Image (cartoon, rainbow, N blue to C red):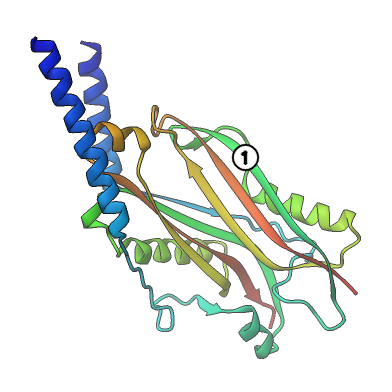
C-alpha cells in the first residue's frame, strides 16, 4: 500500500513537472545581450569586411580567434553580462596574438538544459550557459 | 555510500561550474597569406569551404591533438587543392562539449573554420 502510494505521488509529480514545462515553453522567453564595441577600452579596432575594404589600408590576416565562456545559472538569473566578459577575453586573446584589429566579429549564446535533469528535477531551474565570440585577427602592414 | 560520493562529486562540479570558466583559442598560421578578409577585384568564388577538426578532452585539457590551427591549415590546403588564389570572408567557431554523465571529465572540442575560396 505504502509503495503504491509513493508510486502514485511520483506519477502525479512527474505529470505536474511535464505540464509546467509545457506551459513555460508555450509562454516562450527572451534574453538579451548587448556589448557596445564602438568605444571599447582596448586598443583593438573592430571592423567589418566592408569597412576594412573602405579603409584601403594594407593588412595581413593573422588567423582566427575564438573565446567561449561557460557558467551554470538559474534560468531567471541569466547573466547578460557574460557576453561582455567573453568579449573582453576575446580582445585579450586578439592582443596576445598581436592583432591590431578584429574583423567580422560574431557572437552566440546558448542555454543548455540537460534532458535528464529536466525530467528528474524541476524544469528551468538548472542550466549551463555558453557565450561565444569569434572573429579574424589582422595586423596593419603600414 | 556510492550515491553519497556521486552526490558530493556532483555538488563539487556544480560549485566549480557556478564560478564559470573561459576558453580562448587562436591560430596564427596564415604564413602563406592565403586567407584574406575580402576578395580583390576580379576574384570569382569557386567553392564554399568548411573544415572542422575534433579533439578529445579530459578535464578540459585537449588530449586529441586537433586545434584551431589544424582547421586553418586544412582550410588553406583544401583551397590550394582547388586551385584557389585565396580564401575570403573567413569565419571560425569552437564548440566545447561535455556530456552530462561525466561533465568536465570527458568531452570533446570541435574546431570549425570556413570561408569562400576565390580565383582570378
- Quarter-of-image position of residue A109: bottom left
Residue at x-position 63% and y-position 71%: A138
Viewer-closest of A79 and A69: A79
Above or below, A33 against B29 in this view is: below
Pointer 1: what residue? B54
Q: Secondary structure at mark 1?
A: strand
| Left or right for A28, reference A89 | left
Q: Where does the image place residue B15, in percent across and percent down from the top left?
A: 23, 39
Residue A9 shows up from this direction:
yes
Above or below, A34 against B13 in this view is: below
Residue at x-position 74% and y-position 51%: B73
- Quarter-of-image position of residue B44: bottom right
Above or below, A4 against A131 in this view is: above
Q: Quadrant of the N terminus of chain B?
A: top left
Q: Quadrant of the C terminus of chain B?
A: bottom right
Residue at x-position 60% and y-position 68%: A137
Q: Where does the image place residue B63, in percent across and percent down from the top left?
A: 56, 32
Q: Residues within 10 Å of mark 1 (few under 14, many from 20)?
A: many
Q: Chain of mark 1?
A: B
| Left or right for A79, reference A107 | left
- Quarter-of-image position of residue B59: top left
Q: Where does the image place residue A18, in percent across and percent down from the top left?
A: 27, 39
Residue A125 shows up from this direction:
no
Viewer-closest of A28 and A51: A28
| Left or right for A68, reference A114 | right
Viewer-closest of B55 and A121: A121
Q: Where does the image place residue B48, in percent across and percent down from the top left?
A: 76, 61
Counting every numbered tag in the picture gives 1
Amino acid at each position: 500500500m505504502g509503495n503504491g502510494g509513493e508510486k502514485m505521488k511520483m506519477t502525479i509529480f512527474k505529470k505536474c513537472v511535464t505540464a509546467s514545462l509545457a506551459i513555460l515553453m508555450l509562454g516562450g522567453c527572451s534574453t538579451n545581450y548587448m556589448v557596445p564595441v564602438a568605444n571599447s577600452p582596448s586598443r583593438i579596432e573592430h571592423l567589418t569586411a566592408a569597412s576594412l575594404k573602405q579603409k584601403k589600408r594594407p593588412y595581413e590576416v593573422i588567423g582566427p580567434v575564438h573565446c567561449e565562456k561557460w557558467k551554470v545559472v538559474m534560468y531567471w538569473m541569466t547573466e547578460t553580462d557574460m557576453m561582455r566578459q567573453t568579449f573582453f577575453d576575446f580582445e585579450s586573446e586578439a592582443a596576445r596574438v598581436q592583432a591590431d584589429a578584429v574583423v567580422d566579429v560574431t557572437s552566440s549564446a546558448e542555454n543548455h538544459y540537460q534532458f535528464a535533469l529536466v525530467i528528474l528535477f524541476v524544469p528551468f531551474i538548472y542550466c549551463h550557459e555558453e557565450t561565444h565570440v569569434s572573429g579574424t585577427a589582422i595586423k596593419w602592414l603600414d | 555510500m556510492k550515491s553519497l560520493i556521486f552526490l558530493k562529486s556532483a555538488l563539487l562540479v556544480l560549485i566549480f561550474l557556478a564560478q564559470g570558466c573561459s576558453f580562448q583559442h587562436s591560430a596564427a598560421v596564415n604564413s602563406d597569406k592565403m586567407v584574406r578578409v575580402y576578395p580583390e577585384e576580379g576574384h570569382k568564388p569557386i567553392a564554399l569551404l568548411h573544415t572542422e577538426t575534433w579533439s578529445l578532452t579530459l578535464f578540459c585539457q585537449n588530449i586529441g591533438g586537433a586545434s584551431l590551427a589544424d582547421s586553418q591549415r586544412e582550410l588553406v590546403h583544401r583551397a590550394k587543392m582547388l586551385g584557389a588564389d585565396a580564401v575570403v570572408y573567413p569565419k571560425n567557431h569552437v564548440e566545447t562539449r561535455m556530456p552530462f554523465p561525466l561533465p568536465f571529465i570527458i568531452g570533446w572540442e570541435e574546431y570549425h573554420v570556413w570561408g569562400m575560396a576565390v580565383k582570378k
